[in-house]
Amino acid sequence: MLEWAEEASAMWQYIVLFLLAAAPWMDVSLVVPLGVLWGLSPVWVSVAAFVGNFLLILILGLFFKQISEWRQARRAKKGITGPTKKETRSRAIWEKYGIPGLAIIAPIFVGTDIAAVLALTFGASKLRVVGWMTVSLALWTIVFAVGSVYGFSFLNLI
């Protein structure tokens, strides 16, 4: 894939990064370093990753009821009755720190998309979830962009 990234036009590379960020379970913690490693502008990589991940959070917020029903049916079909390890970890963070804590810690431990679904499941309002996840996503996007640039530069990878 690295060969394709080197040969493709920059526009296609940014589109791929946007689509990766918009995919469930792909967070800025993976997409931003990948884009920086490809040699793309950290600013535009950050914008593409942020917008892609924000779009996913917005869709989750808008269509939570439908997604929740689908998720419950899927879990029942698989025979999952109790909470998963990520759900248990998220519940503990939720009970201790509330939505701000879950949103800030989410990109590292569970991912913003999973945290958004869990916060909504725990009863938080859609507006608060989308708002806090957006703030968290913006902060972590900047952290990963700066960290990637300096880290890869220090390691002579870019």
Image (cartoon, grey):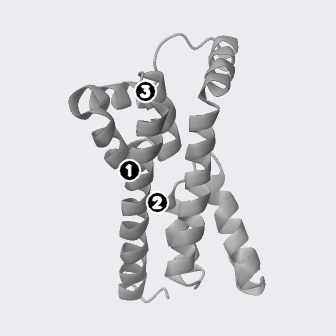
Mark with earlier residue (2, 1): 2
Determine the CA span between mark 3 and mark 2: 20 Å
* Figure check: 152 above or below 30: below
Residue 87: x and y in percent read 43, 27
Q: Is residue 1 visible?
A: no
| Quadrant that contains the N terminus | bottom right
Q: Which residue is mark 3?
A: 87
The kind of residue on which mark 1 rests is Ile
Judge left or right: residue 98 versus residue 4: left
Disc 3 marks a residue whose amino acid type is Glu
User: How far across and how far down the image is residue 47, in percent?
Assistant: 55, 70
- Exactly how many numbered labels are in the figure? 3
Q: Is residue 72 visible?
A: yes
Looking at the image, which residue is at 61% across and 36% down?
62
Above or below for 61 versus 57: above
State yes or no: discs 2 and 1 in contact (Cβ < 8 Å): yes
Q: CA distance from mark 1 to mark 3?
A: 14 Å
Residue under pointer 1: 108
Nearest to N terminus: mark 1 or mark 3: 3
Q: CA distance from mark 2 to mark 1?
A: 8 Å
Residue 110 placement: quadrant: top left
Q: Residue at x 36, y 62 (%)?
A: 139
- The vertical placement of 141 against 85, above or below, is below
